[in-house]
Amino acid sequence: MELLNLKLAFRNVFRNRVRSLITLAAIAFGCISLIIAGGFFEDTFMQMREAYIHGHLGHIQVYKKGYLEKGNTRPFDYMIEHPEKVKELIASVDHVKFITPRISFSGLLSTGENTISILGQGVDPIGEKTIGIIEGASAGVAIEAGENLSSDDMYDVVIGTGLAKAMGSKVGDFIILVSNTVGGALNALDMKVKGVFFTASKEFDDRALRMPITAAQALLRTDGVQTLVVLLDKTEHTDTVKNSLMDLFKNKNLDLELKPWYEMADFYNKTVELYGRQFFVLKLIIAIIVVLSIFNTINMSVWERAREIGTIMALGSKRYEVLKLFLLEGLILGILGGLLGIIVGTGLAYVISFIGIPMPPPPGANINWVAHIRVVPKLLFSSFLIALISSLLSSFYPAFKASRLVIADALRHS
Amino acid sequence: MDVVEVKELTKEYYLGKTLIHALKGVDLTIRDRDFLAIAGPSGSGKTTLLNLIGCIDLPTAGSIKIDNIDVHGLSSDQLAELRAAKIGFIFQTFNLIPVLSAFENVEYPLLQRKTKKDERKKGVMNALKSVGLETFAKHKPDELSGGQRQRVAIARALVSEPKIILADEPTANLDHQTGAAVLEVMKRINEEQGTVFIFSTHDPKVMELANRIVQLMDGKIVP
Ligand SMILES: Nc1ncnc2c1ncn2[C@@H]1O[C@H](COP(=O)(O)OP(=O)(O)O)[C@@H](O)[C@H]1O
Ligand SMILES: [Mg+2]
């Protein structure tokens, strides 16, 4: 009987070919829109996330305990004293690819005419270069003019585009950098502008200055560092590594704490949430399209086939069997339409990705970028599920109506 | 042995706000091996009576017993089981399922009863043979003539070996000669297998084949 129902349902679906094809096209169209839109969001998130991570956040940052809470006001009270030892320890954890130290400080930058407060970063030029590489995409930190720092630099700096504009400085200019030392005295260094950079974060570019960590340590008169930036092999491993590191710190009784990238990328989180809501609305709209088109098809079919329904019930089919038959027809439409949508949608996504969508800089950033359609299994699965569930939902009412027909009336139906 | 026993059967319909008395107290007993014609002009209640006997509609009042089972109060599923076990249907408009072949149409009631595959095949081929259509097993309904379609419908009614086969104007959509041939088939099955046939008609030539005729007029049996 089950096999018969399946056979009947299949043949019935293809009985009115034009109508069924239109229905299938509507469902497929819905799935395709979901895949393209969802894949676009997925790619945007991915690129944005990687840009933040490789721009300056890294995957995880490690600090001395207390830094996160009080580091803002007393940054030099929370220094990691033997960075080399800690580095070694962290490097032993799975999925950790690279670790680089940083010192942050606030200071004043002066050209003689202009003086501006800045956010200084002492960095290891080689380390930052490694972090800045995003596999298969542009670098997280891009040099707009001049050159980036290299390992043999000492009294050279690179500054963000916004800062360069505000200072009116260009490559080759000499500037004076003033800051408090760890001990509280005032210290100043003469530095040369070696390059101008930009990252995904405009906020960062407006205030940031980077210099070799050795020069920064000399300026601040310290041997310690504040931050160890940890880079992983894959962003997906962030939580795993975060947990192993926390266990490690606890077991070894280390006075350290950490923060993963997503707790620092506030703008990214807000964007994901906003887009996520938009995407939900899109899903809803598409579910409604699918529901309406299948409802229409099955409803018309019940109406046209009233006499046939009366006949099979006269022959002994029970109400629930009629219900099942029409639900099955809706389900078949949903499955076929969903599959068609997945196949065409995936193909289309590859074509669009191959061409690429040129995009303006996202809010808060400076970089033009090229969007792709990123087809992830989760997305295919969810669009297929939407097709399936809405097809079942929408065939339920007509199927129920069919199963409740008075047989004699259905048979008189012409 | 009484196969069908109908007492004081009344059926009323509402057509908008007007009440239509389609049957006004019908008493009828149908015995084993009957080949019974229900005659009467259009609108006299023939279809209504057959539908009530076939348990595909419910009476307003009165009682119906099929094979000594009072159908009053049975659930729709119980009625479906009763129909599947005891009653076959032949319709004026044939009502074959268009997406199924002749073989599959005849097989349908057997699948309903979960008959085994080889038994099913034998039953279907026997039924098709007895209506002379064994070579048309693979044809779809739209590849068959009207007379052939009605014979497939007879095979479908026959295949589950019901006690009773109900046929509402089985020849009305066929030309005279084809209609007569279809009725001959029914008659032969009645004689060979003892299946009770109750059919309605207003064709006097068809009536002649019946071994009993019940005349309906305005919802009542004419004595
Ligand atoms: N579903 C219905 N709703 C309203 N009136 C009906 C319905 N079915 C039949 N009738 C009426 O009942 C009477 C008997 O009809 P019917 O049994 O079809 O007669 P026959 O089959 O002899 O032509 C007719 O007056 C017909 O109009
Ligand atoms: Mg009639």
Image: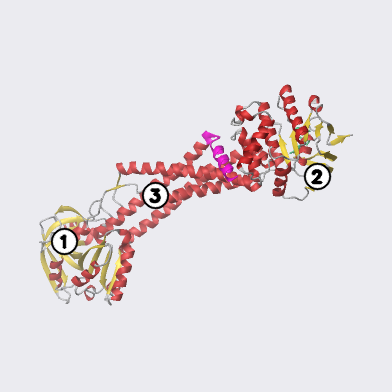
Q: Please provide percent x and percent y for residue A132.
A: 22, 57
In the rendered image of this protein, does residue A114 appear above or below residue A361?
below
In the rendered image of this protein, does residue B162 appear above or below residue A169?
above
Where in the image, quadrant-wise, is ligand 1 located? top right
Of A139 and B104, nearer the camera is B104
Give the letter of the chain under mark 2: B
Residue that protrudes farthest toward the right in the picture: B223
Query: Which amino acid type corresponds to the residue marked 2 in the rendered image?
Result: Ile
Q: Specify whether tag 3 is near ligand 1 (CB below 8 Å).
A: no
Residue extent of the magenta highlight: A1-19
Give the letter of the chain under mark 3: A
Q: What residue would you read off at disc 1?
A: A125
Other-residue count near label 3 (Cα within 10 Å), few / some / many at <14 / 14–19 / ≥20? many
Q: What residue would you read off at disc 2?
A: B64
CA–CA distance in space, label 3 to label 1: 38 Å
Q: Please provide percent x and percent y for residue A171.
A: 12, 55
